[in-house]
Image (spheres, helix red, strand yellow):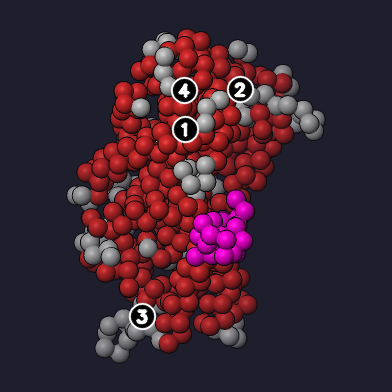
Amino acid sequence: MSPAHWIYLLGLAALIATVVARKNVVGLAVCGTFVTALVYSGSVTTGIAAVFNAGIVAARELLPIFLIIAIVTAMLGAMRGLGADLMMVRPLQRFVRNGHLAYLVLAVVTYLLSMSFWPTPVLPLIAAILLPAAVRVGLPPLAAAIAIAITGQGMALSSDYIMGVASGLSAQGAHVPAGAIADRALIISLIAGVVALAVSYLRDVRTKLLDPVVAAAAALDLAAAGDGDVRAETHGEARRAASGGGDDRDGGSDGAGATATLTAANPAGPDGEPARPGARARIVAVAVPLAFAVLLAVMLLGRFTSLVPDIDDGQGAPLVGGTAALALVAVAVVADRRNWLQSCADHFTDGIGFAFRTMGVVIPIAGFVYVGLSDYSGEILGMPDGAKGPALLLDAIGHVQDHIPHVPVFASFAMLLVGMVIGLDGNGWPGLPFTGSLAGELGHAAGADPATLAAIAQNGASWTGGGTLVIWSSLIVVAGLTGVPVIDLARRLFVPVVTGLVVATAVAAVAL
């Protein structure tokens, strides 16, 4: 391998170690981008320009995620002004009577919806409708984020059983039926998910439920993420996350600050009790969930029946974001017909500010990772249009594949490790044809089933980059919509997810 390969790999290792140590990662990512580009090109000017180009590429790739967080935050802010957000979640409390049950309900609902539509498009629906109810009965926001990430970004995405995109990519290289890989990937993902959920429950849920007063305040903090005091508090959390100084509190918030937020969100009536929402709030509380329910119904009918046209892949997130934007306008009109134009602008500005304050730290980190991927490296390094950029990450993996012992158990865990390394790109799926090819070669040499090896690597790549372990993946959506620092969320997910993957791989190596 070239010096650029080694510099990039050292940078990745340093990045991961720094995140684990909860130290500053932005400066390291910027330096890693510069040094990698400098060593690869031999030009100082290319190295300097690569730092900026990497940020542009990363921002372009992450912009849809930032935008959907901003729009949903703006919609919730408009609903909060009417008190409709609290009315909306009251009917769901019959299903989430306590924090333990809320954890289970969130996990099941997220998994079922994510299996049909992929996790990212359904996250705003869960955050807008189910998450506040779960927090109000005592589930800490961090525990809610863990349940959502494990079942959506992990279990559902790693099997991709309904849409079948991931298994199709794996089958391209493994030369085995995609259905065989999908069946095995589903079993592996279920084992890994159940183990991860259990470990997280024992560590982060069972003994850390919120008492009723703190839970009510935390729910209002969650809903008011774009407003005054909470906006400043969130900015502080974002800065702590960027510097690695994340708070050790698991989803709770300061008691005095939460009480202030509670008072601001629900001004007291004449009798000292919170004022009751009016008729307009009731209309909004019914209309907004109904709009999203209709959207889900249309998507389901299009996928499983011929009653309506099927919605093309990739349209789920735009449809959810567009629905939330139209809901923002409608709620603003209902709340104040005279000033609705200014109200829409204010709420949208708050949403944009919230999204970039809490998640903007990932842009330089993702930019460094993209330097090692051929789909992006050419643009970052200023290569001519059409020129193939270096694939530093995949080249490094290919360099060590001949050193993997030809024993089924070793081959299985080697494929898990390769898949997790592939997932460091924050996606994981672009490398699935490569892991499929490697599974085919190792399977025949080690006497293992290539479909099983490909499914193991698919799980490793999807759980890591899909994501539950790297902060420059769609994990930032989960963190943003639940109001928790993304670094803290990734840190709390590491042990449960890795434990689940190790157990699932061991079972697959023996039984599948």
Other-residue count near label 1 (Cα within 10 Å), few / some / many at <14 / 14–19 / ≥20? many
Does 321 appear in magenta? yes
Instruction: List the residue tagged with mark 2.
Output: 392
Q: Between 18 and 144, which is closer to the camera in this rendering?
A: 144
Highlighted range, magenta = 297-322
Q: Between 351 and 87, which is closer to the camera in this rendering?
A: 87
Of discs 4 and 3, which sits in the foreground? 4
Q: CA distance from mark 4 to mark 2?
A: 25 Å
Instruction: List the residue tagged with mark 4.
Output: 450
Asked whether the beta carbons under mark 3 and mark 1 sit within 8 Å of each other, the answer is: no
Instruction: List the residue tagged with mark 1.
Output: 181
The residue positioned 35% from the left and 27% from the top of the image is 512
**Dot 1 lies on which element?**
helix
Q: CA distance from mark 2 to mark 3?
A: 57 Å
Instruction: List the residue tagged with mark 3.
Output: 267
Q: CA distance from mark 4 to mark 1?
A: 9 Å
Of discs 4 and 2, which sits in the foreground? 4
The residue positioned 57% from the left and 34% from the top of the image is 169
Other-residue count near label 4 (Cα within 10 Å), few / some / many at <14 / 14–19 / ≥20? many
Chain-order first, disc 4 or disc 3 = 3
Expressed as whole percent of the image width and height from the top left, the position of residue 29 reads: 55, 32
Chain-order first, disc 4 or disc 2 = 2
Of discs 3 and 1, which sits in the foreground? 1
